[in-house]
Amino acid sequence: MRCDERFDTGRGRPRRRVGPERRPHRLPTRAPGIDVCGWFTRRQAVRSAGWGSAGSARRCAMTLSADFRAHAGAFRVDVALDAAPNEVLAVLGPNGSGKSTLLAALAGHLPIDDGHVALDDRVLDGRDPDSRAVRVPPAQRRIGLLGQRPLLFPHLSALENVAFGPRAQGVPRAEARKDAGSWLERVGLGDLAGHRPAQLSGGQQQRVALARALAARPAALLLDEPFAALDVETAAQARRLVAEQRDSAGIPLVLVTHDPLDAVVLAARTAIVHDGRIVQQGVTAEVLGHPRSTFVAALAGVNLVPVLGASDGTVRGTGSVADAAASSSDAASARTMPDPADATHSVLDAQPGPGDTIVWRGVGDDVPAGAAATVAFAPGSVRIQQSDAIGPATPNTWVGTVSMLEPIPGGMRLRTAEQPGIAVDCPSTVAVAVSVSPGLRLRFTVHPDVVSVRRA
């Protein structure tokens, strides 16, 4: 046997050793970033998958689209959504609403019953143009999924965990380790590269998992509450990292979260999920700033008040119908919904209860006299002042007697006997200055610029 041959135990005869530049690799014909089909050398395969000599990604921008029905046990999901390149789509919903089930179907871990999941014209689940059934295995989808648990390899160091994705794609060991080290630096763990998961805290493990997901250069990235286990400072750093990936990688990202702040900071669009269905989706500022139902308002943590148009250009209504601000004491679970049995139930369907009529002015739609509408505003946008027994009859102002107090970070949330459906967030400094306590009568004012008005 010549020195450039070695024994092939599978066939019982020697075979010629093939160098790394000549070793053939058969790649999926519809893989992201690959323009032609056939056999590739190792380096061609690596570059086609989006890797350059400096570890930079060069991939075709793709839109992730899905419209499918699926079930996990007795629970069913029926959703339609899409996320464009360089876009974060936030998916919000209470616990058990189907958010993680949705991601499992997109990633290929849960088979769909019917419909499709696709990256541009590359069908991942469903039927191809010739009506043939297609189901691409999770490992071949080039879709990264970062779940609520890090799921790091316990026998590998942080560096080796992050380098795993590139190595699995055929990147040379030295290049993969160099790129992994760069990602660990970006998540603030460069000095812990040699540590194994058991030597890291829970927050550190989650940052390693995020770096591993990003280092694999996915064609799309799914994030399942990736910041939930992180402290405030670390979560802010992780959000910045995701924002950088959003702006530079040219891939769609789907972010499942229970925190509206994540959607506000990262997402251009937001979808609200309840009981396996998307009950509202659109531009984040609109979905969270002016929800269409009390359910979404509770999730977003805003007040939503039904009103009627008046002849003077204002709108009028009470605050006793739409108790839309979610309880801050359990912000992560969403908590207490006004009508969990029907997430699409409009606040306008409710019958007004007792309460003084408030005259409202705001920004948004012009509402004709007698037409139904809603006004929305954040509990923190309400100004609190000491008041006499009789309040002024000016727009966006009401007087009420404190009937309920509940602690929130940095202050307290209060409600009044006269307007029980309107939540007001009071900073600690204000609470001390006006001696807030049950039975105290106060004047409340909201600036028109922060009041959103929408016709029904």
Image (cartoon, helix red, strand yellow):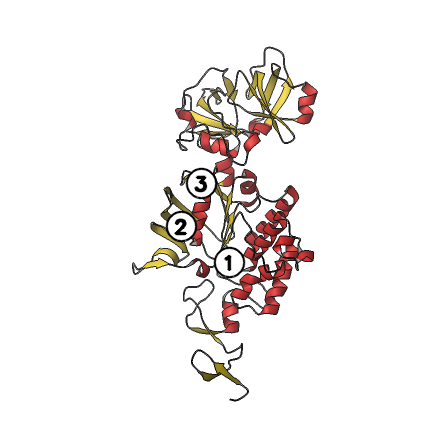
> Furthest-left residue in view?
131
The amino acid type found where label 3 is placed reads Gln
> Is 243 displayed left or right of 370 in the figure?
right
Vertical order, 170 against 270 (above or below): below
Task: Mark yes or no: residue 290 visible.
Answer: no
In this view, the residue in front, 99 or 265, is 99
Q: Which mark is residue 218?
A: 1
* Real-space CA distance between mark 2 and mark 1, rounded to the nearest whole angstrom: 17 Å
Residue to which mark 2 is pinned: 66
Among the two numbered marks 3 and 2 on one chain, the one whose residue lies closer to the N terminus: 2
The amino acid type found where label 1 is placed reads Pro
Q: Secondary structure at mark 1?
A: loop
* Real-space CA distance between mark 3 and mark 2, rounded to the nearest whole angstrom: 14 Å
Residue to which mark 3 is pinned: 281
Quadrant housing the C terminus: top left
Q: Quadrant of residue 233?
A: top right
> Is 341 displayed left or right of 390 in the figure?
left
> Is 346 displayed left or right of 228 in the figure?
left
